[in-house]
Amino acid sequence: MSAEQITRFVAKPLALAALLGAGLVAQQAWAQANIVVNFINTGTVGYNDPTPAAPVGGNPGLTLGEQRRIATQHAANLWAATLTSAATIRINAQFTAQSCTETSATLGSAGPIGNFRNFPEAPFQDTWYPSALRNKLAGNEATAGSAQLQINFNVNLGTPGCLSASPWYFGVDNNPPPGAINLVVVLLHEFGHGLGFTVGPTNGQTGARSSNSPSIWERYMLDNQTGKTWFEMTNAERAASAIGIDRLVWSGPQVTAAVPSVLQQGIATASVTGPAVRSPLTVNVGEASFGPAISSTPFTGEVAPVVDQPDGITGLACVPLSPANARAVQGRIALVDRGTCNFIVKTANLQAAGAIGMLVADNVAAAIPPNVGGVNPAATIPSASVRQVDGNFIKEQLKRRSRSTTGVFVTLTRTGTQFAGADAAGRIKLFTPNPFQGGSSVSHYDVTAFRHQLMEPAINGDLTQSVIPPQDLTFRLFQDIGW
Ligand SMILES: [Zn+2]
């Protein structure tokens, strides 16, 4: 969802005394922070856009600009009710052009303005803290009246050439129509980066530190194979860890204690049987953010392919199924290929044809199956995805099908005790794809987290406006670093 692009370092002089033992801040039963948003667009764009708009989803604004301001203030209020700080939190926000194509877009980008070390109240010496957190710990503003966060949102979203089918949704009721992008959720995400959800001034790709000091994050970024934190690693070790798929976890006690109440226990799998399968093939599946969730109660169905493309082996289900194909998938789990249209379009067409489930085969070779994202409250059938190689395996089995039966069955279930998106020790994974993804790697939770988390690198349809358990682990991480 973002890039940590804006990081101006404000190095403070070394102070001799650091307050020891302040690492664990007493939890308060109340929360209160004052957040001031500076809308810094100039002219008639972004927050000042005078284009008339109709009130939507609890947002009474009558222009695009006004709706953007109201949604932004709504998200700021949610964070203000969660955080505790005696120092006013100031945010510079604007809508600007962001990288964008018809199939993908940077929704927003954000980061702290400035990082501080060796202020008297710092729990750890020689450690960088994002400026809003520094102010919270110090109880004052380092620079009175200055903003501590910079946030940019994509002003072109939903226009030709920039995810034209996915405009912003400015409602504040967490109920966007299919395809629209929920601005309030993206706001909460970007505010999260600016408040401190980022590896900070340490370079996530090279492992190099700013002025030889670690960021506060490094103490909790643990390689679960070597047992070392980033704090204990060399630059080269940090760089390797940043692309060490499934190895880098967050070890902070607040997040780890909350993992069982937030993440689903058990890994979602598909077991495939067929006439030519000697023993069932069990593979991990990507889960859907709509429709019935995969549970520990097995869901079994016969698989039938969707074949709506000229090559006879590819089925996209982007348009209503032909009568013959609808008969073939009726009462069965429909196998479709990823691509061309959104997952929710495919599900809707299959559901209308009488299918009892959707299994999506990835259309590119990837290490893990894709998340089946989207919002569709009308979905009543379960959906899941498999890797391209696993999809090809199933297609091979289906070639032997007869007129009356395909003979291929899939069982979707959730097995084991591991939490989805966490390692075997119950620590949530950070996002560490290989190769490194600038702006996304390291400074997000992993995409395998389920339920999905606000601070994953991409938006998912099951996100709420909550940043605390049992929905979300963002604020728990903030507590680990000193909020
Ligand atoms: Zn992000």
Image: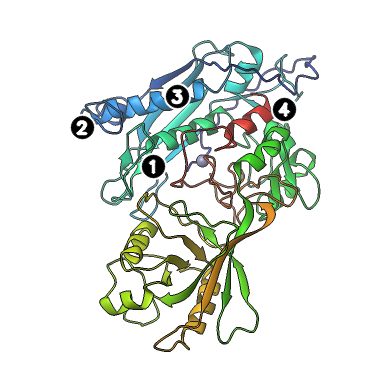
User: Which residue corresponds to the image point at 49% horizontal and 36% vertical from the top-left?
Assistant: 189
The answer to whether marks 3 and 2 mark residues whose Cβ atoms lie closer than 8 Å is: no
Q: Amino acid at mark 3?
A: Ala
Query: Dot 4 corresponds to which residue?
Result: 127
Secondary structure under tag 3 reads helix
Q: Earlier in the sequence, mark 3 or mark 2?
A: 2
Front residue of this view, candidates 225 and 463: 463
Residue 98, label in figure: 1
Disc 3, ligand 1: is the CB inside 8 Å? no
Query: Dot 3 corresponds to which residue?
Result: 76
Q: Nearer the viewer, mark 3 or mark 1?
A: 3
Front residue of this view, candidates 135 and 415: 415
Q: Amino acid at mark 2?
A: Ala
Residue 54, label in figure: 2
Q: Which quarter of the figure is the C terminus placed in?
A: top right
Q: Quadrant of residue 455?
A: top right
Residue 430, given in percent of the width and then of the height, sits at 63, 46
